[in-house]
Amino acid sequence: MRGENQSSVSEFLLLGLPIWPEQQAVFFALFLGMYLTTVLGNLLIILLIRLDSRLHTPMYFFLSHLAFTDVSFSSVTVPKMLMNMQTEHLSISYPGCISQMYFYILFGCVDNLLLAVMAYDRYVAICHPLYYTTIMKEDLCVLLVAGSWILSCGSALLHTLLLTQVSFCADNIIPHFFCSLPILLRLSCSNTSLNELVIFTAGAAVVIFPLTGILVSYGRIGASILKVPSTKGICKALSTCGSHLSVVSLFYGTIMALYFSSSSSNSNDNDMIASLMYTVVTPMLNPFIYSLRNRDMKLALEILFRNIVFTK
């Protein structure tokens, strides 16, 4: 940073969730259980895909990366939130706050792009089944995942570099449980018009383009199903796309709640509730959605448990 843009703030104070002191222990246990469920559930999905050769397909290749991203996404904010609740040590260093914001944006963008990639995979599988193996080659799958990570890194790095150019003066209190970019900009005593413009343009691109791809993919899937209106075809399509559609609905539902909460009268509390849904609840539910609604995952899980029992 240049000398004139050096921040006089060396640390921030994360106020966390608006919870009464006598309720801290209950909420700590609740969020700790949810976080452990998120980590163990998603790591189990990665393990099953790794061990079962029948799951070595493009769909499960993308799912393993989504599971890894969900674990990482929750790990950016939840451990610090739990530590603050337990120790009441609310401070976070300036570099720590900037790093947390960077990884929050990074994993959020990757999650978003991977859902669009998975929608395209389902479109090819249903609308062009004879050419599926030809189109969804290993090279293309790796390229799509690598592209998602590269674009997300670029977006997160752009926001982070721009944030390091603004100054923070006396106010260092963040009324949230993590370092949120919009809140940090509100605390700044510099001109943040460029930052806000980048949030509007880059943020809209990262959300709108993948969502458009998802809607177009499922629109074509729906049109393809209607051409052959058989009960068997509809059931097959639902079994193939049901899990992904559920995750997409949950993911974008929380994004829309987060967006509309900013315009309400009690926007800060609503923002924290939506952020909890986005960072804690959604990553926790994804493993259940994919394991309970997916026959291949349930079969792989049964085989794993059977092998564990027999080896004992």
Image (tube, grey):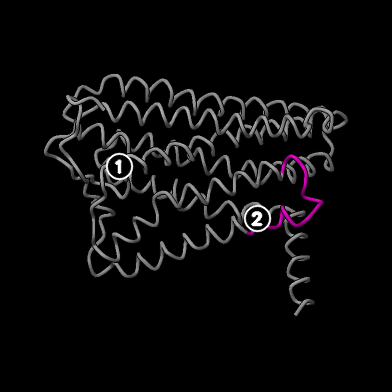
Q: Dot 1: within a 10 Å radius of its alpha carbon, few (fewer than 14), some, or many (20 or more) residues?
A: few
Would you name the residue on which mark 1 appears? 95
Residue 218 quadrant = top right
Q: Is residue 45 left or right of residue 302?
A: left
Residue 255 quadrant = top left
Identify the secondary structure beneath mark 1: helix
Instruction: Look at the picture and state if 287 lies above or below 149.
Output: below
Callout 2, which amino acid?
Answer: Ile
Comes first in the chain, label 1 or label 2: 2
Mark 1 or 2: in front is 1
Which residue lies at the image location 21% right of the left edge and 49% below the top edge?
13
Question: Can you give x and y, in whole percent of width and height, for residue 304 in the image?
Answer: 75, 66
Residue furthest bottom as drawn: 312
Over which residues does the magenta segment extend?
44-59
199 in the magenta segment: no
Would you name the residue on which mark 2 appears? 45
53 in the magenta segment: yes
The alpha-carbon separation of the residues under discs 1 and 2 comes to: 33 Å
Residue furthest left as drawn: 170
Callout 1, which amino acid?
Answer: Pro
Q: Is residue 297 left or right of residue 9?
A: right
Q: Dot 2: within a 10 Å radius of its alpha carbon, few (fewer than 14), some, or many (20 or more) residues?
A: many
Are the residues at dot 1 and dot 2 in contact (C-beta closer than 8 Å)? no
